[in-house]
Amino acid sequence: MKSLLKRFSKNESGATAIEYGLIAGLIAVVIITAVGLIGTELEAVFNLIQTRLGTITP
């Protein structure tokens, strides 16, 4: 029984999986935030282009 408990306490595969999950979650949050910020700025650029193209007289 003691050897089983020792092996269980030394097993770190579950901790490694949790660490990888946390890293993947943090990367996802960073990507979502960046896309949100870039998307807003890109929308403003396209609106500006649309406005300026609309004011051009042929």
Image: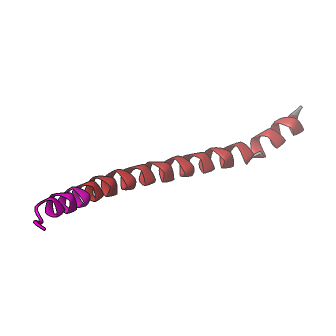
Return the residue nearer the eye: 28 or 9.
28
Above or below, 32 against 9 in this view is below
Residue 21 image point, x, y percent: 60, 46
For the view shown, which residue lies furthest in the top direction? 1
State left or right for residue 23 relative to residue 4: left
**Front residue of 17 and 4:** 17
**Can see residue 12?**
no
Which residue occupies 75% across, 41% down?
9
Q: Position of residue 17 (x, y in %)?
A: 67, 46
Q: Residue at x 63, y 44 (%)?
A: 18
The total number of labels drawn is 0
Res. 28 visible in picture: yes
Q: Position of residue 51 (x, y in %)?
A: 15, 58
Q: Is residue 21 above or below residue 42?
A: above
- Chosen colour scheme: secondary structure
The spot of residue 54 in percent (x, y) is: 15, 59
Q: Tell me the chief SS of the magenta region.
A: helix
Front-most of residues 35 and 58? 58
Q: Is residue 13 magenta?
A: no
Magenta stretch bounds: 44-58
Q: Residue furthest front?
A: 58
* Image quarter hosting the C terminus: bottom left
**Is 58 displayed left or right of 19 in the figure?**
left
Quadrant where the N terminus is found in the figure: top right
Identify the residue at image location x=42%, y=49%.
Answer: 32
Which residue is found at the position 10% from the left and 66% from the top?
Answer: 57
Foreground of the two, 47 or 30:
47
Vertical placement of 58 versus 28: above or below?
below
